[in-house]
Image (cartoon, helix red, strand yellow):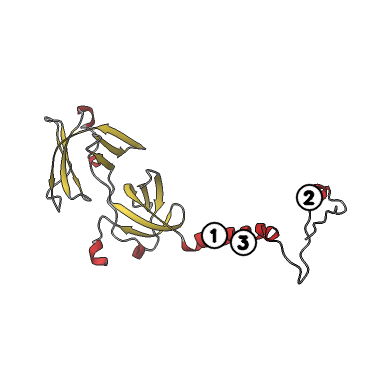
Amino acid sequence: MREMTFKPAGESACATNSCRLLPLVGQAVSPAWLLPELLLALTAITLLSACHFGRVNSGHVVEYYPQQGLLTVVDDSNCVLHVSVPQDAAEMGPVPTPGKLLRVDTAARTLTYFDQGLKTIPIRLIGQKQARTPGGTFPRIDRTRKTVTLYSPRDRMSITLSVPAQYLNLPNDTWRFGDEIRYYYKEPGRALRLMNVSQTDLASLQ
């Protein structure tokens, strides 16, 4: 198909642009001519699908402000997010329990927690014990022995760690895992549906 260049009266902007005519009925259409139009259509479909179906994210709750209905969540990519809970209480599930503890890596001898950002402290594993339920109050801080015993709901075990003395005065929620949640949203920061994974018996849902 031949391309034609023209210059409309009073519009100099088109002087350097090639303006293509639509093909006549029955005339062969070049695939190259259709490519920009197809790309535009596919982009529009993708954006509309994302807006319609929404997205799912997951992470640990490190702060919860019930009056504002606002959560601070550290997601699986270690991003700190502020998420509003669903306005419909039926879409909320059990209220999440916050905790600042995010990760205990006994191999690397580090513990990661949240305090206006992600922070890491050195640790040494003293012992660990399988426990399906906490079986008491955690954390247990022994300032004489400079140890902290915490409970991991995911691993279902209590873990005793040796930590430097200067960290023993951190708030108790530093040594407590926050509930793991999974939420559905269309607009970032606004959960339409929220599932408390830590307080849900997933086996009963199968």
Residue drawn at 40 percent across, 48 percent down: 82
* Mark 2: few/some/many CA within 10 Å (<14, 14-19, 20+): few
The residue carrying mark 1 is 46
The residue carrying mark 2 is 17
The residue carrying mark 3 is 41
Query: Which numbered marker is on residue 147?
Result: none
**SS at mark 2?**
loop
Q: Earlier in the sequence, mark 1 or mark 2?
A: 2
Nearer-the-camera pick, 102 or 87:
102
Q: Amino acid at mark 1?
A: Thr
Image coordinates for residue 179, horizontal then vertical, percent:
28, 51
Q: Quadrant of residue 144?
A: top left
Q: Amino acid at mark 2?
A: Asn
Q: Is residue 177 above or below residue 42?
A: above
Nearer-the-camera pick, 117 or 65:
117
Left or right for 66, reference 149: right
Left or right for 162, reference 61: left
Q: Earlier in the sequence, mark 2 or mark 3?
A: 2
Q: Is residue 202 above or below residue 82?
A: below
Task: Point out the image quarter for the N terminus.
Answer: bottom right
Q: Earlier in the sequence, mark 1 or mark 3?
A: 3
Q: What is the C-alpha distance between the residues marked 1 and 3? A: 9 Å
**SS at mark 1?**
helix
* Mark 1: few/some/many CA within 10 Å (<14, 14-19, 20+): few
